Image (tube, helix red, strand yellow):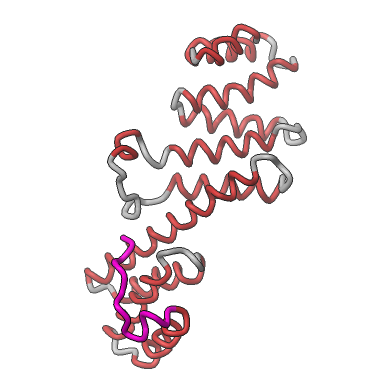
Amino acid sequence: YQRAQKNMKSGDYVNAIKQLEGLQSRFPFSEPARQAQLDLIYVYYRSRQTEPAVDAADTFIRENPTNLRVDYAYYMKGLVYFERQLNFMERFFKIDLSARPPKDTRKSFEAFASLIQKYPHSPYVADARQRMVYLRNRLAAFELHVAQYYMRRGAFVGAINRARYCIENYDGAPAVQPSMQVLIDAYKKLNMVELASNAERVYAANYPQDANGAARKKKWW
């Protein structure tokens, strides 16, 4: 275990993984082996081995539900999925994720939500909350992207459903305002005059500057 710690500190994650895995297999019921489970989550994460990191976190959570460090396992699971949303090149070129199905985003959000719900006093809660704000906005942006895609295809009912879902589930996200506009446009396309008028009133109440004809800012997307 000491050799593994030394390799972790020096950034030699390949050998650290070998030693931690060896420790678990040779001394499975020892206290160092239990700590090695937590360390493996970290070294898998740092060496960008996503699936082993998630498996290690799930294993620790399942086998040690009363352990004082189980909050760390939840946090690291969320962090692994959070980091997997973008690879290095996508980060460098600042790729827009709104068109990409947010599978890892949902998993990250769920892991952080479990952490906050089960361990509200954990030292990792503050960081998890901040990440969840970003993840929530990301989920909302995807719903807007799909709604706009349906509008372009003439699938107005589908556009209404996705826009409404965004509005009802992600209140306060940047994607909500354009989702409201999608809703209004789709109702008008379907000649649902009363529903369009109701949506316009809600839009005017929430975004009076735009509703009064003021110059609109450039769309966030």
Judge from the rendering whether residue 100 lies leftward or rightward of residue 153; answer left or right: right
Q: Position of residue 194 (x, y in %)?
A: 39, 93
Which quarter of the picture shows residue 179?
bottom left
Task: State the extent of the magenta-drawn residues as a range.
Answer: 207-221
Give the residue at x 49% y 56%: 136
**Is residue 83 or residue 215 the one in the foreground?**
215
**Is residue 146 or residue 202 the one in the foreground?**
202
> Which residue occupies the extreme left position in the image?
153
Residue 47 versus residue 192 in the image, above or below: above
Give the residue at x 61% y 50%: 113
Residue 171 versus residue 116 in the image, above or below: below
**Is residue 75 or residue 205 the one in the foreground?**
205
In the rendered picture of this protein, how many numbered marks are placed on residues?
0
Residue 212 covered by magenta stretch: yes
Q: Where's the N terminus, which quadrant?
A: top right
> Which residue occupies the extreme top position in the image?
3
Judge from the rendering whether residue 132 lies leftward or rightward of residue 189; answer left or right: right
Give the residue at x 68% y 16%: 33
Q: Position of residue 169 (x, y in %)?
A: 51, 66
> Which residue occupies the extreme front position in the image?
215
Give the residue at x 37% y 51%: 101
**Is residue 52 or residue 35 the one in the foreground?**
35
Which quarter of the picture shows residue 188?
bottom left
Q: Where's the C terminus, which quadrant?
A: bottom left
| Main secondary structure found in the magenta portion | loop
> Which residue occupies the extreme bottom position in the image?
194
Residue 69 covered by magenta stretch: no
Residue 199 versus residue 34 in the image, above or below: below
Q: Position of residue 2 (x, y in %)?
A: 65, 8
